[in-house]
Image (tube, coloured by chain):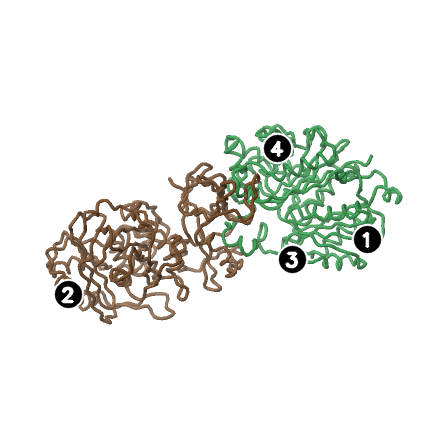
Chain colours: A brown, B green
Amino acid sequence: MKGITAYGVYLPRLRLSRQAMVEANAWFDSSLRGLGKGERSICNWDEDTITMAVEAGVDCLSALPEKSLSGLKLASTTAPFIDRQNSVLVAEAMNLNSQIRTMDIGSSQRAATSALIAGLESAKQGNEIVIASEHRRTKAGSRAEMLWGDGAAALTVGDDEVIAQCLAIATTAVDFVDHYRGEGADFDYDWEERWIRDEGLMKIVPETVSTVLKSAGLVAADIDHFILPSDQARTPATLAKKLGISMDAVIDNQISFVGVAGAAQPLILLAKALESAQASQLILLLGFGQGCDAILFRTTDRIEHCRPARGLSGAISNRREEINYNKFLSFNNLVERDIGKRGEVDKQTFLSGFNRRKDLLTGFIGGKCRVCGTVQIPREKYCVNPECQALDSQDDFSFANQPGTVLTWTADRLTFDWSPPAYFGMVEFECGGKLMMDFTEVEEGTVDSGSKVSVHFRIRQFDTQRGFRKYFWKAVVEN
Amino acid sequence: MASGIKDKVVILGMGCSKFGERWESSPADLMVEAFEECLKDAGIERNQIEAAWFGAGIDAFNVGSSAMPLSIALRLNYIPVTKVENMCATGTEAFRGAVYAVASGACDIALALGVEKLKDTGYGGLPQRTRGVENDMYWPNLSAPGAFAQLASGYRAKHKVNGDDLKRAMAHVSVKSHANGAKNPKAHLQREITEEQAINAPFIAEPIGLFDCCGVSDGSACAIVTTPEIAKSLGKGNLVSVKALQLAVSNGAESGHASWDGSYLKTTRVASQRAYDEAGIRRPKEEITMTEVHDCFSITELVTMEDLQLASEGKGVKDVLDGAFDAEGSNPCQIDGGLKCFGHPIGASGLRMLYENYLQLQGRAGARQLPDPKLCLNHNLGGFPHQNICSISIVGPYD
């Protein structure tokens, strides 16, 4: 059977202080005080399931020597489009080839493990990428708001040079409705936590675990890393004890400093296990939702040679504290903010025009002139070099991974932005070419002419009138 | 080889409305106000106008597209009227059309009128508007101050200028213009300000503060042009003649090629050199008496002084602070108060600036009158520092 060949992670940089959340909401529900420790990851206004998926995917590929992929599966319950395949958008933003098999998998908290199983059981040769990304909206002042976080992780699965071999797979499909999100609903509706634990997790999971272990000819005590995604902090350990798995093997759900990232949580925690695992260790990955998925892996000697550029530890440490709970409400459209008349401008996307410029907008593709070698973005009919101006002379040139430098910039407090001031400026790329771009994740006082930047796929605008959103690339200052 | 426009066309008359927050006035009201003054000044009848050029920059927003708003507002006699729009160079573009028509011999007397009614947006600053189907998908939502603030960052980096020194020079630009505008009854803002006020005003787009921005107003201005011979035959004396009319438009090199560093305005350098050549000017600093430049923001004016060769490159801060462009300086700039005090009704500005040149050359500028003006330069800049349209016109006495 196939195995994992690389992994990557993305967590939004912003971490909302739970104390700030409690201060805003404890007047209404004093029980929240008990959850007021640490922080959770929150998407910036211009991040969503798609942008995080792209980041996680790129991080994963950073550790994969052979970059060509045969498939991409995107697992999420919060994909922004119901009918427009989100995985294709992610694939194009990652500049993957257009022959790739793509699929969106959702509707369950075990979407990611089911996607991973499908990838592992696929007969197709070569590496396939499985990305899980989640940005769940929650009601203000809810327990879920306190415990959950936003994030994404990606894995590639293949036959060659695996870092963790898949040994066995088991699934139990049970319509146990611990929570649900019905058609047209913005938020989940859930049932009592204790009932979910006692009648759901404690009964369904052991059955699946027993099957997978039996199938591999192993016992619970052999497990080195036990992954049970859950926002019930103590349940994984309770289950491990019941199953006979060592307490040392239990992978923490990192509720206190990231939060539980829904359908992405299994892969985020698997990345965490892979990051710390040594060769020949057993990893048991579970996904719980309308039953249970169990996947058993054994790490190989290659595990220590495969490290993504960021990984989970990098994602966790790349953080900025946010103490303004109102900003979180605003970013998640949980409060109707007065956006001013400048924000009222129609944001319609003209789809035929979008399609013409898709290389630029999604892939961040510019051109390189065959005649003079000038690299440029956007690509136009004539070369931009005043000394050249050759016609139709440019080959595709990707700017997606190109480092740049700020030439000019400002912080604009007049224009509309979801998180003012709007930072933008002229970026000169080290490879040549320059572009007037939005900046994101700017900390006041850290940007100036000469600042180094990297570029990232982000939301550019929401068309709330028509349920569309535009994406484009933005510069992030590397501090 | 083309002989250029020098001394082929003269101004027969001009008019300019009061600029300001003209809540009570429609675009047509403003047009008529400027036109009535212009017609009287020219001393002709309306039906002697044979062709007209109409400039309005944000037509979809208020004035209305096509040439009809002008023709209807002025009840023109079914003559050819052309609507032009070229961002902030629109007013000068309208003037260019009328001047070229007369120079070509296609007509004897032509009208250029610009108007803009900005104060119907419901908020301050220029209206937020589309930049086209494709650009809207990836351009930042840059406001005008957001675009021009970058000129300051580019200038600072290139010339290694201390940010505080640049901010002080920018403040001086605005203080000077407010002092001039205080003497102009047609200006929107007629109040002096202090350097401290300018420096301490809240940021609009770093480092541009409130007083670094021009006003936002409604207004209209117009000109009637003809040949020197016809003007003389109509008994007109003290003729103001067109010496140069130039336009330079970005081709994308500034925004996409390494040859531009963000510290200056390429189009201004190109258009002004062409205008100097057309007018036969060799030493601009000595030969140009006064300038009306596109001070949409204080930093634009400062950098423009260098681009027009009225200050050496990198020395703009010093020259501004030394008062070279003050009313009593060597090259007075914005003697009427500039965009700073008039605001910038897009389609009207170029013609409003020309109106000041015209008054100065005719000795009719009242409290603002400069001694013995000769060559007067107008500069408009539409768009953004990295992608723009620059117009230059130079007028002077007809010899």
Pinpoint the chain carrying mark 4: B
Amino acid type for the residue under numbered disc 4: Glu
* Place of residue A263 in the rendered image (x, y in percent of width and height, measured from the top left): 29, 60
| Residues indicated by labels 4 and 3 sit on the same polypeptide chain | yes
Q: What amino acid type should be assigned to the residue bearing mark 1?
A: Glu
Image quadrant in which you'd find residue A196: bottom left
Query: Circle 2 — which element?
Result: helix
Q: Nearer the viewer, residue A283 or A176?
A: A283
Residue at the location (73% across, 41% down)? B356
Same chain, marks 2 and 1?
no
Q: Nearer the viewer, mark 1 or mark 3?
A: 1
Quarter-wise, where is residue A285 in the image? Answer: bottom left
Answer left or right for B343 relative to B3: left
Question: In the rendering, at what x and y percent does residue B243 appear?
Answer: 76, 38
Q: Earlier in the sequence, mark 4 or mark 3?
A: 3
How far apart in space, not on screen, are marks 3 and 2 (Cα)? 72 Å
Q: In which quadrant is the N terminus of chain B drawn?
A: top right
